[in-house]
Amino acid sequence: MLRTLRRLRHAWSQRVAVEGGSMLPALHPGDWLLVDTEAYEGRPPRPGEVVVVPDPRHAQRWLVKRVASTAADGRLVLVGDRPDASTDSRTFGTVDPSVVIGRAWLRYWPPRRIGRVR
Amino acid sequence: MRDRLLSLIAPSRTVQAHCDLPCGIYDPAQARIEAESCYKIIEKYEANTDQHFRTRAIAIKEQRAELVKHHLDVLWHDYFKPEHLEKFPELHETFWQATKQASKVKQSLELAEAKKLLELIDTIDQAWRATGGPEKTRVAKAAVA
């Protein structure tokens, strides 16, 4: 409980809005999320988790994608939940886990869909 | 009041769940044509007792219904934006109903189900028009001399 509150206070400073539908139905365009930037301080992202990363081709632009798997060299394979409407590791290759900004952790808007990102 | 509260909790930046190189052409007409096919196929199915014809009709209707879902999905993700949702708060619900209805039409041979699908697509079409869809996405037709 205390950990969650602490995480909430920390993640509150990293609020992002989802644009695009490549992560439907997990994330809708217009969803507002809290990003836990401390999630990967002690461990690398695991397959199945939704992460925020800078676009490898355009670092100012941030992407939200799911970790599909970890390559043999430890780099991450990122894929959208709707692969036919997603630009991801199939286009830009694997991603270094150290550049991951954080884990897309909690949806706080809209109110009726508040909850953890899964 | 609500707007002020929202601006307090609004995110400071966006994260992209995008597809690159969208062609920018989004039009509910695509979904409607496929849904019209479903409707007409059910009519033809009812009017024809030939088993082979009926089997083909069902197979084609299922393909068309699947295309309806695809076109609606693309419109949903790629055309509509959060600011449109503020104007049409029911939009997500309508898309959900419409895509579910397309699944129903895929399974069903009831004309009424196909009609309901057309109506839901027309509701989406209204939102598309009200948000400037035709001006934003359509290419002008050649003028008829």
Image (tube, coloured by chain):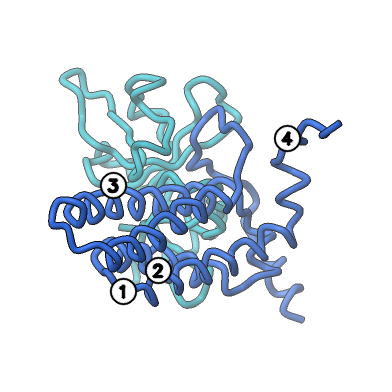
Residue identified by numbered label 3? A49
Residue identified by numbered label 4? B139
Residue B114 % position (x, y): 40, 68
Quadrant of the rendered image containing residue A64: top left
Please tell me which residue is depicted at 63% across the width and 65% down the height of the picture. B85
> For residue B110, which numbered disc appears in the image?
1
Q: Residues within 10 Å of mark 3 (few under 14, many from 20)?
A: some
Q: Is residue B106 left or right of residue B101?
A: left
* Mark-to-mark CA distance, 1 and 3: 42 Å
> For residue B46, which numbered disc appears in the image?
none
Residue identified by numbered label 2? B114
Name above or below for residue B108 compared with residue A87: below
| Chain A, chosen colour in render | cyan
In which chain is the residue bearing label 3? A
Q: Amino acid at mark 1?
A: Glu
Do the residues marked 4 and 3 share a common chain? no
Name above or below for residue A104 compared with residue B102: above
